[in-house]
Amino acid sequence: MSATYTDAPVSHSLEARGLSVGYRQGKKVLKVAKDIGFTLQKGGLSAIVGVNGAGKSTLLRTLGRVQPPLSGQIFIQGNALGSIRDRDLASQLSLVLTDPIATRNLSVLELVSLGRQPYTNWIGNLAPEDREKIQSAIQTVGLEPLQFKKCYELSDGQLQKVMIARAIAQDTTIILLDEPTTHLDLYHKVQILTLLRDIAHKQGKTIVFTTHEIEMAIQLCDTMLLLDNAGNPFGQPCQLIADKRFDTLFPRDLIQFDADTGAFRVHKSAHDTQK
């Protein structure tokens, strides 16, 4: 029986309290980020942003129980993450990492079908409901014309859509994605993030992703977690801008944040300005 954290309202889809993430090497502890706290509701798109090495991917992997937290607590629907059985967790949370896919020889349909593994019997037979979920996921991301193609034949953007479709087919409340727009051009970055936002809003999912695309996240996300090792603020983008949280993310002599446009600008020296 899963232990329930009684102070956490059931409406909270994903919650972190006093969380520290990093790695243990023998007796040594490498703390990458600490004092992380946030509460996410269903039906929202959230981004984890920060500079290189801030701990974005480490945090995401910790939320997905790929690695344990150094300290603090994580809750899913009020249940402590560590108390949830693996099979139950697979029906509540899906994870899309940047690790190389070992199954690129599969077709799009076959790879998306793997999302139904938590629900199939021991030999993996797909029931009519499973096939319906798979086709619905393929249609959601617009992959119908490609479903019989091999994954190695796809572009990076198309393959990313396949991974998202697999997560949708898994039919979980929470979807975590690590850098889903890496190696994509501007058009496909916007396409993927807009797709994720639509899925979150229309299907009532809690979707969290890590990204270096801070300006895009400001425009498209409902909430953001800024890993800055100075409080790690969490909130709506407009509130983070009002609180000047982005102003000190990068060295001001090189990059400045324009609160009016929500964009970062390269700081020009006086000499350059006079040219």
Image (cartoon, grey):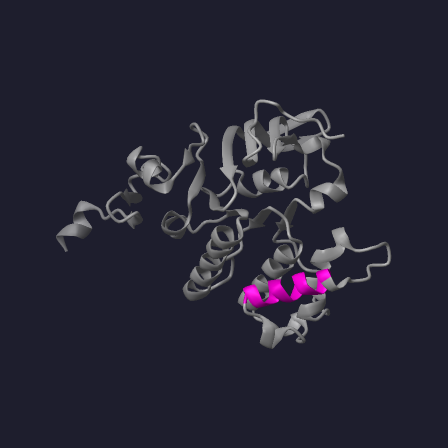
Q: Is residue 159 above or below residue 82?
A: below
Quarter of the picture containing the C terminus is bottom left
Q: Is residue 183 left or right of residue 109?
A: left
Q: Which residues are magenta?
A: 129-141
Please report the residue visible at 79 percent of the width from the left and 55 percent of the height from the top: 120
Looking at this view, is 105 or 169 the one in front? 169
Does residue 96 lie above or below 237 as drawn?
A: below
What residue appears at the point 55 percent right and 27 percent down from the top-left corner?
17
Using the rendered view, name the quadrant where residue 165 is placed: bottom right
Location of residue 99 in the rendering, given as x and y in whole percent from the top left corner: 65, 54
Pick the residue in front: 255 or 143.
Answer: 143
* Horizontal and vertical percent position of residue 185: 45, 65
Judge whether residue 6 can be spotted in this image: yes
Quadrant that contains the N terminus: top right
- Name of the residue lying farthest toward the right: 123
Q: Give x and y (percent) for residue 66.
A: 68, 41
The furthest residue to the left = 274
Quarter of the image for residue 125 reads bottom right
